[in-house]
Image (tube, rainbow, N blue to C red):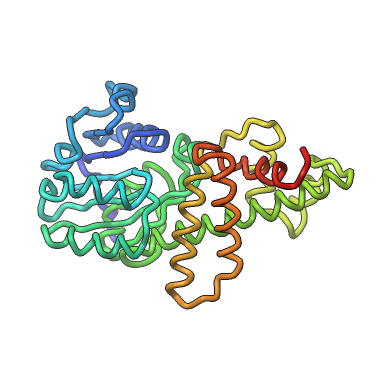
Amino acid sequence: MPEEAPLPPVVGFVGLGRMGDPMARHVAAGGVVVRGFDTAPAAVQGLAGVVTSVGSAAAAAEDVPVVILMLPDSDAVESVVDDGLLDALEPGSVLVDMSSSEPLRTRELAERIEGVGAELVDAPVSGGIRGAEAATLAIMVGAEHDTARRLEPLLALMGRPRHVGGTGAGHALKALNNLMSASNLLAASEALLAGQRFGLDPAVMLEVVNGSSGRSNGTETKWPDHVLPGTFASGFTAGLMAKDVRIALGLVEATGIRGGVAAEVVERWVAAVDLLGPAADHTEIVRYLQQTSGGD
C-alpha cells in the first residue's frame, strides 16, 4: 500500500459562500492554514478566526501549494484566473476547481494553467449545504492518478473524494449526475402531484414508492425534507440546476448521444426558472408544475 500523502500546511480558498464556508471550516479544523478570499466582505468576516483573510484571489495563491476554488460556474472561474490568479500560482502548485464548471472549458483552462508550471484539477461536489456542513460531500476528482492521490487527504476533510478520470472528468460527471437528479425530481413531482389530485396521500405514496422501484433522491430526500413541509430550502437554486442540465445536454450532444430526454429536461427547468426566478430553490420545481397545471 502506498504511503498516504501529507496534508499541505497552507491552502488558498477562493469562494466562501454557503458551500465554501463550511468546506473551509473543515479544512481549517483539519490543521491546515486557510488563506481565504471572497468578493463579499461579509463571507470573510463570518470566518474570522477560522481563515486568514486576504485582499484578492491572487493573494490567496501566493506561496501556497494548493488553491481551492468554490465558485458558481466556468465564467466565474475564468474571471478569477484572469484577474491575477494565474500569474500568482506557484510552479508545481495545484489549482483545484470545485465549482460546477463546463468540462470542455475545464480542459482548455488546464492548458493555460500548465503554461505557468501549475496543474488544474477539477473536483466538483454533490450533497448540497447539508453535505458541506457534515463533510459528507461526494467529490468527483478529475486529475492524473498521482495528483489525485496527493490531494486525497485534503479533499477527505470535506467529504468522500473519488478519482473518476483525467482532467474534465469530474466536471463531466457532476453535470451528468445533476441531469439525472433533475430528471428524477421532475418525473417524481409530476407523478406525486398526479396521485395527489387523484386522491392519494403524498406521504403514503412516498412511503410505498421508497420501498419500491420508483424511489430516487427526489422521493427519499427532497420531497420529504423540503416539499411536504413547504420549506423549499435545500440550498441549491433552480438557476444553478438549469445551468448544470444545460452543461450536461451540451456534453450529451458533443458525444453523439441522441439526447431527447435531456433536451426536454432542460426545456422544463429553463421554463421553471423563467417563472420562479433563478434564486428559487430547485425543489420549487413542484410550484412550477402546480402553476402550469391549472391547480394548487
Image quadrant containing the N terminus: bottom left
**x then y, percent, for residue 270:** 54, 51
Q: Is residue 170 visible?
A: yes
Q: How many marks?
A: 0
Residue drawn 30% across and 33% down?
A: 28
Residue at 16 percent across and 52 percent down: it is 93
Q: Is residue 1 visible?
A: no
Pinpoint residue 149: horizontal percent, then vertical percent. Answer: 30, 58
Instruction: State the image quarter where residue 122 is shown.
Output: bottom left
Q: Looking at the picture, how far across and down is residue 83, in whole percent?
A: 17, 44
Name the side, left or right, on which 185 lies relative to 17: right
Quadrant (top left/top right/bottom left/bottom right) for the C terminus: top right
In the displayed orientation, state which residue is furthest to the bottom: 256
Q: Nearer the viewer, residue 30 or 226?
A: 226
Q: Position of residue 82 (x, y in %)?
A: 18, 49
Residue found at the very far right of the displayed protein = 199
Q: Residue shown at 73%/57% (left/top)? A: 214
- The answer to which quarter of the image holds residue 64 is top left
Closer to us: 271 or 257: 271
* Left or right of residue 14: residue 209: right
